[in-house]
Amino acid sequence: MRAALERMEKDRGLDVLTAKMRRLVLVSYAALVALMVYRGLQIEGDSGPLVPIVAFVLPLVLFLPSLIGRRPRGHAWLAFVSLLYFAQGVMVATLPGEGLRGIVEAVASLALFAGCTGYARFRSRQLRQDASSS
């Protein structure tokens, strides 16, 4: 796996790979946040839809400064958190009538995981390369 990633870095370049992973992270992050807001709106509670929305979206929003700052370590931690959303999506997919929503949530969280791990790898290598060349 390492050899394949290094060959890909050499063939396509770190800048291109970093930009592609960044786009994947942003698109899948937005999709997952939208799905969590929708899910929170579907839950009816005594306090209204605000509490479920905050409960579902807060873990994602906490990583917003890392996404804006393009920090590789924050992206790596977001990858771990996205696995929780994957597990939740798989569990929701097993519920009657909720299969499609669960599958979409699982796919969005897997895309976020892949994008975050790729971005963390390529961006950290890019930063090391820039530091060694200056």
Image (cartoon, rainbow, N blue to C red):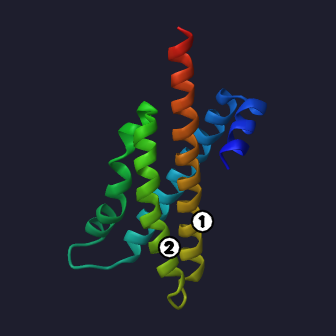
Measured as percent of width and height from the top left, residue 43 is found at 36, 77
Q: Residue furthest front?
A: 3
Label 1 neighbour load within 10 Å: few <14, some 14-19, many 20+: some
Q: Secondary structure at mark 2?
A: helix
In the picture of the structure, the residue carrying the numbered disc 2 is 89
* Residue ID at (53%, 68%): 105
Label 2 neighbour load within 10 Å: few <14, some 14-19, many 20+: many
Measured as percent of width and height from the top left, residue 15 is found at 65, 27
Q: Secondary structure at mark 1?
A: helix
* Residue ID at (49%, 68%): 86
Of the pair 48 and 5, the residue shown nearer to us: 5
* Residue ID at (51%, 32%): 124
**Of the residues shown, which amino acid type is indicated by label 2?**
Gly
**Of the residues shown, which amino acid type is indicated by label 1?**
Val
Measured as percent of width and height from the top left, residue 72 is found at 46, 37
Of the pair 115 and 57, the residue shown nearer to us: 115
Of the pair 133 and 3, the residue shown nearer to us: 3
Residue 107, placed above or below residue 120? below
Measured as percent of width and height from the top left, residue 88 is found at 44, 73
In the picture of the structure, the residue carrying the numbered disc 1 is 107
Label 2, label 1: how many angstroms apart (C-alpha)?
A: 8 Å
* Residue ID at (61%, 41%): 21
Q: Residue furthest top?
A: 134
- As drawn, the label of residue 21 is none
